[in-house]
Image (tube, rainbow, N blue to C red):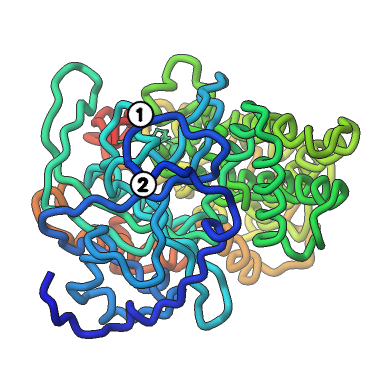
């Protein structure tokens, strides 16, 4: 680096590194792979890369750090967020955590390719932790390289921001930077490794602590470290609960249950499949975290998972996400049990998950359908029939709900009118039999009768439905098109998608192309329908 770098706004970032300040550190400074005991983290520096090049940044995420677009376009920004330069006040480290992977206890995992730079306090007094993903090996890298490729980084960058704008709790993404180096990946796990462009994403969240952080200390019997971490989390991220005690720990766990339920209801609302809901990928703040082989439902199919590693058991399929949320919370309950030493209050808190999920799901479905409120069994019957119909023929979930909002509740539909309304949502027109259309028509007319029970007029109902049913989601094939271009050095599509996905509920006449069904060529193409964990 040149010796006379001008002072920039980046140097004004105010760091307040509570995680490393409060919690026990790994005493070994050397960066080699190992088991790290009785410590929450290991200090480690990002690896220097050849030629950092900014691919995209989120101006809204930047504003959380009080940074402007001009700051993000400076060469210094690319240097800092590729990991080449450490700012004064940064104290980089990798976290130590464990987790259950696909239902099996995996022992120590940890930040194998994530390096936390520190936490800043912004002008509004908010705490934001900054984390680079793909910035080189750490003591937790096990047999892997600590790096990430452009393809998976672009997917994480875009989806984090898209989820935020959809109103889904999520970690944020500040920047996507190409490293100018290549990374070798065997994308299909078929023994044909290839060099791919490397990249680093900078993620932001109030905290990156996962269920697995607590689990590891419990599994090792490191109860005092566990206690420190729980107290730290309550004091830092849940201060409204009051000073840590047995009671506050139970109240905190109940709050984690509620937040997790709320997050998963949002996933079900927008058709998001996380793909790898291992307990190390569950945020203690109830944020969607670790965007790997995730996917978006195109045709509504509760059994769908995008993750090839999970193709057999489909543990993390769309419709199973609510149950997995519970399974993961049970593991967290087991982990904090030594601090509570009573099962009853933890079981009660777990019951909060089920009750929150159920009531939020009912309100969410009522909102998707434009009802004033969920009115009980009659609504459930209508919803159940709809969910069945959506699966009988391949129906694009996103398009279906937007079309549904269009109807005029004064109208009685016949089969042809019904077909005309939803034609655009069907993937295989030949599947749509006369008999099927008749069933949908019957449903639609019952639905209209139900709408008439509410006081809402069509214009307001339509507007309300369009605030919960997005027009634009990050369709799997759109992300892949942006990747194809970015790999060829053209970053226009990733930036255009970022802009469209900022207002996912608006009608954008110039962006209709992004709201269409998945094209046929994308049905079986890797990256568009199925993804491997290789990233
Ligand atoms: P993930 O499936 O991305 O949530 O990762 C599971 C675990 O594997 C975490 O501990 C990661 O840090 C680690 N991991 C994944 N990819 C890499 C990599 N390329 N290098 C080092 N560690 C990795
Ligand atoms: Mg992970």
Q: Which mark is residue 475?
A: 2
> If the image is split into quadrants, where does the C terminus sit?
top left
Contact? badges 2 and 1 (CB < 8 Å): no
Tell me if mark 2 has few (under 14), some (14-19) or many (20+) residues whose alpha carbon lies within 10 angstroms of its own. Answer: many
Q: At 66% from the left edge and 45% from the top edge, which residue is drawn?
A: 260
Give above or below for 231 relative to 389: below
Q: Which mark is residue 243?
A: none
Give above or below for 265 relative to 322: below
Question: Looking at the image, can residue 397 be seen?
Answer: yes
Dividing the image into four quarters, tell me where ligand 1 lies. top left
Question: Looking at the image, can residue 423 be seen?
Answer: no
- Asked if residue 501 lies left or right of residue 496, the reply is right
Residue 324: x, y in percent? 62, 30
Count every numbered label the image shows and give the total. Answer: 2
Residue 455: x, y in percent? 78, 67
N-terminal of the pair, mark 2 or mark 1, is 1
Give above or below for 173 relative to 385: below
Residue 162: x, y in percent? 42, 58
Q: At 28% from the left edge and 49% from the top edge, which residue is drawn?
A: 135
Residue nearer the viewer, 370 or 72: 72
Whether label 1 lies within 8 Å of ligand 1 gets the answer yes
State the residue position of label 1.
142
Tell me if mark 1 has few (under 14), some (14-19) or many (20+) residues whose alpha carbon lies within 10 angstroms of its own. Answer: some
Whether label 2 lies within 8 Å of ligand 1 gets the answer no
SS under mark 1: loop
């Amino acid at each position: 680096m040149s010796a006379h770098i001008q002072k920039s706004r980046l140097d004004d970032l105010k760091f307040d590194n509570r995680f490393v300040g409060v919690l026990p550190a790994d005493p070994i400074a050397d960066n080699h792979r190992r088991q790290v005991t009785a410590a929450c983290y290991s200090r480690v520096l990002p690896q220097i890369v050849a030629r950092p090049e900014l691919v995209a940044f989120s101006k809204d995420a930047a504003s959380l750090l009080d940074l402007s677009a001009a700051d993000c376009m400076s060469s210094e920004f690319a240097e800092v967020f590729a990991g080449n330069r450490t700012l004064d006040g940064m104290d980089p480290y990798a976290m130590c955590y464990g987790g259950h992977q696909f239902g099996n206890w995996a022992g120590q995992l940890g930040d194998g390719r994530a390096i936390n730079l520190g936490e800043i306090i912004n002008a509004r007094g908010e705490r934001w932790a900054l984390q680079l993903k793909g910035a080189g090996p750490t003591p937790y890298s096990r047999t892997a390289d600590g790096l990430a490729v452009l393809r998976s980084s672009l997917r994480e960058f875009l989806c984090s921001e898209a989820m935020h704008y959809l109103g889904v709790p999520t970690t944020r993404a500040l920047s996507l930077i190409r490293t100018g180096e290549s990374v070798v990946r065997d994308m299909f796990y078929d023994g044909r490794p290839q060099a791919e462009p490397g990249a680093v994403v900078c993620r932001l969240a109030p905290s990156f602590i996962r269920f697995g952080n607590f689990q590891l200390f419990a599994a090792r019997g490191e109860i005092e470290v566990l206690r420190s971490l729980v107290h730290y989390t309550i004091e830092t991220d849940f201060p409204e609960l009051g000073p840590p005690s047995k009671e506050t720990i139970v109240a905190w766990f109940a709050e984690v249950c509620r937040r997790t339920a709320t997050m998963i209801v949002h996933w079900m609302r927008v058709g998001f499949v996380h793909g790898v809901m291992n307990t190390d990928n569950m945020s203690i703040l109830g944020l969607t975290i670790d965007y790997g082989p995730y996917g978006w439902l195109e045709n509504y199919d509760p059994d769908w998972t995008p993750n090839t590693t999970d193709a057999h058991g489909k543990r993390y399929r769309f419709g199973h996400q609510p149950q997995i949320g519970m399974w993961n919370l049970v593991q967290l309950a087991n982990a904090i049990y030594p601090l509570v030493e009573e099962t009853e209050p933890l079981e009660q808190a777990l019951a909060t998950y089920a009750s929150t999920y159920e009531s939020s799901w009912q309100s969410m479905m009522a909102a998707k359908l434009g009802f004033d409120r969920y009115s009980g069994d009659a609504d459930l019957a209508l919803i159940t029939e709809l969910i069945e119909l959506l699966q009988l023929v391949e129906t694009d979930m996103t398009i279906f709900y937007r079309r549904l909002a269009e109807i005029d509740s004064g109208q009685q539909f016949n089969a042809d009118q019904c077909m005309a309304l939803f034609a655009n949502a069907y993937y295989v027109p030949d599947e749509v039999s006369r008999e099927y259309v008749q069933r949908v028509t019957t449903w639609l007319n019952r639905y209209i009768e139900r709408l008439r029970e509410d006081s809402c007029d069509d214009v307001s109902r339509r507007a309300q439905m369009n605030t919960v049913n997005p027009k634009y989601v990050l369709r799997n094939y759109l992300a892949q098109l942006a990747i194809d271009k970015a790999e060829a050095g053209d970053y226009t599509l990733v930036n255009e998608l970022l802009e469209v996905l900022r207002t996912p509920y608006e009608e954008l006449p110039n962006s209709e192309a992004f709201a269409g069904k998945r094209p046929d060529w994308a049905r079986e193409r890797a990256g568009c329908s199925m993804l491997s964990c290789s990233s």
